[in-house]
Image (cartoon, helix red, strand yellow):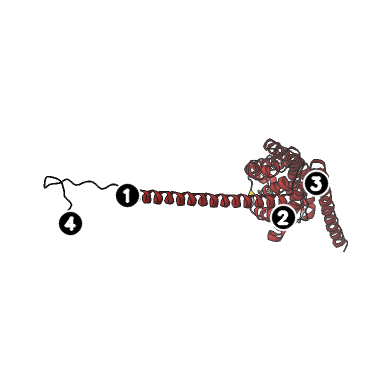
Amino acid sequence: MKTLFASISENVQFVLLCLAVTAAVVLLAWGGERLVMKKRHRLNTAHTITTVGMLAAISGVLMVIELPLFFAPPFYKLDFSELPVLICAFSLGPVAGVVCEFLKVLIHLLLKGTSTAFVGDLANFLVGCSFVLPASILYQKLLSKKGAVASLALGTGVMTVFGSLFNAWFLIPRFAVMYGLPLDAIIAMGTQVNGAITDLSTLVLLAVVPFNLLKGVLVFLAALMPLGVLAQPININNNPNQPGYVVPSQQRMQNEMKIQQQQQQSMLKQDLNNQTRSQQQHLQNQLQTNQQRAAQGGNLNAPQQVRPNNNGGMLRQTNP
């Protein structure tokens, strides 16, 4: 009975810890967003909700596609689910990025469930936020292509350091406790793939650090193209930190109205050209008709040619 109550108590404590950590991350994102973005995106608009939900769904599906690594234990698997989250955070702000990250983990749990007693899912959320948060905050401050590269580099570095320390101090020991395994059993999984792994320190140094660094670099390279093509122009032409900022939904309506006005002006110009061309053709036809009539009238009034007298002598007028 005591074991049951102890297990329930540990699970409740873990759930409370997850909620507290999630709230702390959201608060950190909110503070960073207020610091670097003068005008922020509201999360209760239809456009923002739709965008965050769509990108979170894509991330959840990408999270299902996992690639094992030859140098790490089997519970470390590589995926590219951070890519849509980065696009969300770069275009809508850090808070939207954190919400997208949280929804991504929930969607993954609905699609595949958990195989790590929710410890790995919490780790995925926190390590993902350690990549997305600093990258998006710095990008929203710089808002340039060079800023995007610097932001991704910063996110990679922070994720590598945070992920390694988090694994050493919390994730691996907690994983062992939740599964009722000794820590040596977890280390033995690393020893099977790399004989140089003999303790927790070497496990972190030879497996966790390369894993986070490789994931950060691959996501960095994969994110350069979409973030350079999509996210950067969104904010360069409509900078929330500059005067005259327009909400993206209003900006789209203005662009659509501008396109409609341009189309109407083009149609009016084409109609005017057609009318002008028709009038010119009509005037030209009238001019040709008048010239033909004038030529015909000249032929009728021309003097008759005198015929020669073939009989010789002068012509006499005879009475009938």
Which residue type carries mark 3?
Ala
Q: Residue furthest front?
A: 319
The crowding category of the residue bearing disc 1, from other C-alpha atoms within 10 Å (few below 14, some 14 to 19, many at least 20), is few
Q: Secondary structure at mark 1?
A: loop
Q: Nearer the viewer, residue 142 or 8?
A: 142
Q: Nearer the viewer, residue 128 or 99?
A: 99
Looking at the rendered image, the disc whose residue lies closer to the viewer, 1 or 4, is 4
Task: State how far apart marks 4 and 3 are (Cα).
Answer: 129 Å
Answer yes or no: do the residues labelled 2 and 3 have beta carbons within 8 Å? Answer: no
In terms of sequence position, does the residue under pointer 1 or pointer 4 come before the other?
A: 1
Residue 187: x percent and y percent?
Answer: 73, 46
Q: Nearer the viewer, residue 314 or 101?
A: 314
Task: State how far apart marks 2 and 4 are (Cα).
Answer: 112 Å
**Which residue lies under the disc numbered 3?**
29
Q: Secondary structure at mark 2?
A: helix
The crowding category of the residue bearing disc 3, from other C-alpha atoms within 10 Å (few below 14, some 14 to 19, many at least 20), is many
In the figure, residue 103 lies in which quadrant? Answer: bottom right
Answer yes or no: do the residues labelled 4 and 3 have beta carbons within 8 Å? Answer: no
**Which residue lies under the disc numbered 4?**
319
Residue 316: x percent and y percent?
Answer: 16, 50
Which residue type carries mark 4?
Asn
Which residue type carries mark 1?
Asn
Residue 20: x percent and y percent?
Answer: 85, 52
Task: State how far apart marks 1 and 4 are (Cα).
Answer: 30 Å
